[in-house]
């Protein structure tokens, strides 16, 4: 997801414009859940118990989440190799 900066007429302040994206980030191989990005909403569904969680997330939040998920994957990878 990216942001464009729009300048209001006569204004020196740039306003972010969030591009509307609908992206499937992850789908469980057995269809038991998914993670979707819908605009600025992150939607996590669990088909096993029919639950859903939705949070608002921006560009910096996505980057922070990506860093944490990457670090967690590295940690899990090391644990599996032991």
Image (spheres, grey):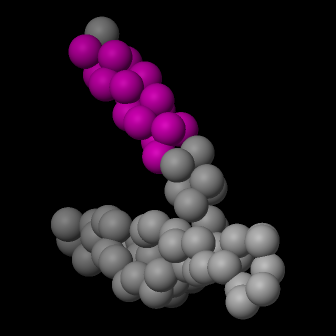
Q: Quadrant of the C terminus?
A: top left
Q: Quadrant of the N terminus?
A: bottom left
* Residue at 21% from the left image edge and 71% from the top image edge: 30
The image shows residue 45 at horizontal and vertical percentages of 48, 78
Above or below for 7 versus 30: below
| Left or right, residue 8 beside residue 5 | right
User: In the current view of this chain or complex, which residue is farthest to the left?
Assistant: 29
* Residue at 55% from the left image edge and 79% from the top image edge: 18
| Left or right, residue 33 beside residue 39 | left
Q: Is any part of residue 35 visible from this angle?
A: yes
Q: Is any part of residue 38 visible from this angle?
A: no
The image shows residue 53 at horizontal and vertical percentages of 62, 77
How many labels sit on residues?
A: 0
* Residue at 62% from the left image edge and 66% from the top image edge: 58
The reply to whether the magenta stretch includes residue 33 is no
Q: Nearer the viewer, residue 38 or 78?
A: 38
* Residue at 61% from the left image edge and 79% from the top image edge: 6
The reply to whether the magenta stretch includes residue 69 is yes
The image shows residue 74 at horizontal and vertical percentages of 37, 25
Q: Main secondary structure of the magenta part?
A: helix
Residue extent of the magenta highlight: 66-81
């Amino acid at each position: 997801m990216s942001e464009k900066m729009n300048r209001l007429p006569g204004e020196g302040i740039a306003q972010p414009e969030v591009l509307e994206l609908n992206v499937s980030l992850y789908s469980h191989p057995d269809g038991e859940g998914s993670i979707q990005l819908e605009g600025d909403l992150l939607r996590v569904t669990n088909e096993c118990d029919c639950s859903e969680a939705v949070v608002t997330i921006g560009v910096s939040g996505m980057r922070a989440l990506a860093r944490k998920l990457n670090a967690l994957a590295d940690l899990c990878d090391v644990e599996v190799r032991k």
